[in-house]
Image: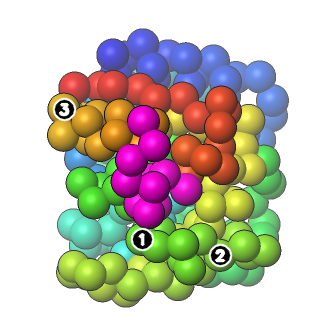
Amino acid sequence: MAESLAESIAEDLMAPENSFLILPGGSSPQGVIKELARQDLLWDQITITTTDERRVPMEDAQSNAGQVKRLFAQEGIEVEPLWLGEAKIEDLSFPASVTVLGMGPDGHFASLFADEDMGPGKDIIEATASFQPYERLSLTLEALLDCKRLILLVPDQEKWTLCQSVLAGENSDLPIARLFQAAGSKLELHIIA
């Protein structure tokens, strides 16, 4: 599953010059990112950043940008750290070609934990997690939706069950429910377990 998804993402990145790819951190996307790094693409024409970032140095194991960069390392592919802030994000050429999202067991995605965190009218917001490391930056729901292709990775049965409950109209207070509502049919669910 990871290989076929990576191949289809690579096809999306071949079309336009100066493509823009947004990836999540965490364990869910690791297989897809490793497979994507093997794709024969003009990586110097593709900008890569992350959905969200913990306020830690890029070398820290908790850094999403650092993790993504390490997964791409053997290819010498660059990753733009989100923690460079709003000025840097304004330089990114939205819409993104592809945005890939992961989700937490509590139904959060990126570092968007509640409705007030969705950040309308902005591209990036400061966020606070209920677990360490607490301080984060996140692309807003609006920025994450500003893409040509939107993918949510569902890596295990627990998260798939949560997605099914949201799709059935339950757990409507979860951030992932807000994503489903806002994205509609644009959102692709990929079970990668």
Secondary structure category for the residue under label 2:
loop
Q: Residue at 45% x, 36% y: name it.
A: 167
Asked whether 170 or 131 is in front, the reply is 170
Residue 100: % across, % down: 51, 42
Structural distance between the alpha carbons of marks 2 and 1? 11 Å
Outermost residue toward the front? 169
Residue 119 disc label? 2
Report the residue marked by disc 3. 157
* Amino acid type at image mark 3: Gln
Q: Earlier in the sequence, mark 3 or mark 1?
A: 1
Position of 65 with respect to 191 (left or right) is right
Structural distance between the alpha carbons of marks 3 and 1? 21 Å
Residue 25: % across, % down: 36, 54
Position of 120 with respect to 1 (left or right) is right
Q: In which quadrant is the C terminus drawn?
A: top left
Q: Earlier in the sequence, mark 2 or mark 1?
A: 1
Q: Is residue 129 above or below residue 188?
A: below
* Amino acid type at image mark 2: Gly
Asked whether 162 or 139 is in front, the reply is 162
Q: Is residue 173 magenta?
A: yes
Secondary structure category for the residue under label 3:
helix
> Label 1: how many residues lie within 10 Å, few (<14), some (14-19) or many (20+)?
many
Q: Is residue 40 above or below residue 130?
A: above
Q: Report whether residue 76 is seen.
A: no
* Amino acid type at image mark 1: Phe
